[in-house]
Image: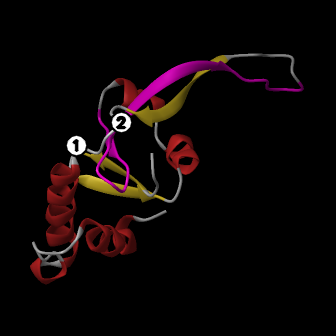
Amino acid sequence: MKPPIVIDSNGDLYIYKSVELAESDLEAIDVKNKEYVGYDCEGRLLKIETVPKQRKVLWGLFKPVLDHVVIGCAESEPAHRDDLKKKLVQYLEKVAGQEQAPLNATLSELLEKAAVFCGS
């Protein structure tokens, strides 16, 4: 898995510089409701899931179990490059206009342009 990480939430894109940033920002309830589709910068589909994690609060007196978001690879080879490129073009057209989303742009060029609007 190669950053940046792109998360699609029903057409709204979020670009994260690292997996850790994406995991800490995504809502576990939204992951459970399958509201996210994730890709790495090469177009590799990502698996986004939750795992229970015990957390200490109030000096360790309480240890509630909360869901933690975990992102991993769903495939070893990037087979969704065209899907990611299409989503980036659609997103850029929506937020910046068609001139910012040329169809002949490379995936890395589109990622760079989109990061201006949705990077973190």
Residue 116 relative to residue 67: left or right: left
Q: Nearer the viewer, residue 43 or 7?
A: 43
Q: Position of residue 26 (x, y in %)?
A: 46, 41
| Distance between the alpha carbons at the discs numbered 2 and 1 | 9 Å
What's under tag 2, amino acid-wise? Ser
Q: Quadrant of residue 31?
A: top left
Q: Is residue 54 above or below residue 106?
A: above
Q: Disc 2, disc 1: CB below 8 Å? A: no
Q: Quadrant of residue 92?
A: bottom left
Q: Quadrant of residue 38?
A: top left
Numbered disc 1: secondary structure: loop
Q: Residue at x 37, y 24 (%)?
A: 32
Q: Position of residue 28 (x, y in %)?
A: 47, 30
What's under tag 1, amino acid-wise? Ala
Q: Is residue 83 above or below residue 75?
A: below
Numbered disc 2: secondary structure: loop
Q: Position of residue 58 (x, y in %)?
A: 84, 26
Q: Is residue 60 above or below residue 4?
A: above
Q: Residue at x 79, y 26 (%)?
A: 57
Question: Residue 79 bears which disc, if any?
Answer: 1
Determine crowd level at label 1: few under 14, some 14-19, many 20+ residues with C-alpha closer than 10 A.
Answer: few
Residue linked to disc 2: 76
Assign the N terminus to one quadrant of the image.
top left
Q: How is the image coloured?
A: secondary structure
Q: Is residue 45 magenta?
A: yes
Q: Residue at x 12, y 77 (%)?
A: 102
Q: Which residues are magenta?
A: 35-59
Q: Is residue 23 above or below residue 108?
A: above
